[in-house]
Image (cartoon, rainbow, N blue to C red):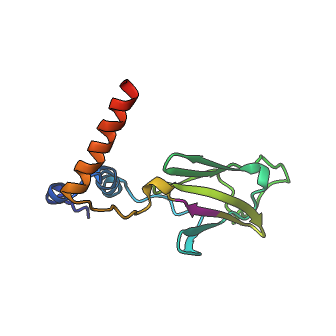
Amino acid sequence: MRTAYDFSPLYRSSIGFDRVFDMLENASRTPSVDNWPPYDITRTGEDAYRITMAVAGFGQDELSIVHEPNLLVVSGERAADDNGEYLHRGIAGRPFERRFELADHVRVTGASLVNGLLTIDLQREIPEEMKPRKIEIGSDKAERRIETKTVKAAEKQAA
């Protein structure tokens, strides 16, 4: 069952959220995705996150983590092993690719593989110019005084 959502009322009162609406529309269009390998996403701090994936049987050289702008791609492909003929194969070793959409200014700070669990640490770092700042409100007279000083200084330099 698929339900189409109309985001047009949100466009009237929001600015710059086009990417978010596009992601929501794309998420509703994608069919059910493969749920292997299993993973957890945890919040470890105010701006810190951790992705933990169960990748039993994969070595460090068989896993790849690629950080693109606003996207984290984790993939794995096992090398062919000729250990004989399998009578039962219950350990999944098929290749995989898992994509995670990242918010702006989220970067990967580290990754480790311990006991079959791949752990990827993420940190959101908002640039200083994008952090909230207080804007001083001046009076009309104050602006004129500043303009007058600027004009007088320019006249002195011209002379």
Majority secondary structure of the magenta segment? Answer: strand
Q: Position of residue 40 (x, y in %)?
A: 57, 71
In the rendering, at what x and y percent does residue 105 appear? 50, 54
Residue extending farthest to the top is: 159
Quarter placement of the N terminus: bottom left
Asked if 116 appears above or below 101 in the picture, the reply is below
Q: Which residues are magenta?
A: 121-125
Position of residue 74 measured from the top left corner of the image (x, y, whole percent): 61, 53
* Rendering quarter of residue 140: bottom left
Q: Left or right: where does residue 44 sit relative to residue 146? A: right
> Where is residue 47 drawn, in percent x and y?
53, 69
Q: Is residue 80 visible?
A: yes
What residue is at 27 percent from the left and 44 percent from the top?
A: 147
Q: Residue furthest right?
A: 83
Residue drawn at the location 60% of the way across and 68% of the way down: 50
In the picture, measured across the screen, residue 80 lies left or right of residue 156, that is right
| The one of 80 and 119 positioned closer to us in this rendering | 119
How many labels were placed on the picture? Answer: 0
Q: Is residue 124 magenta?
A: yes
In percent of the image, x 74 and y 67: which residue is there? 116
Taking the magenta stretch, the answer to whether it contains residue 96 is no
Say whether residue 101 is visible: no
Which quadrant is home to the C terminus? Answer: top left
Q: Nearer the viewer, residue 5 or 156?
A: 156
Of residues 18 and 97, the one nearer the viewer is 18
In this orientation, which residue lies closer to the viewer: 42 or 80? 42
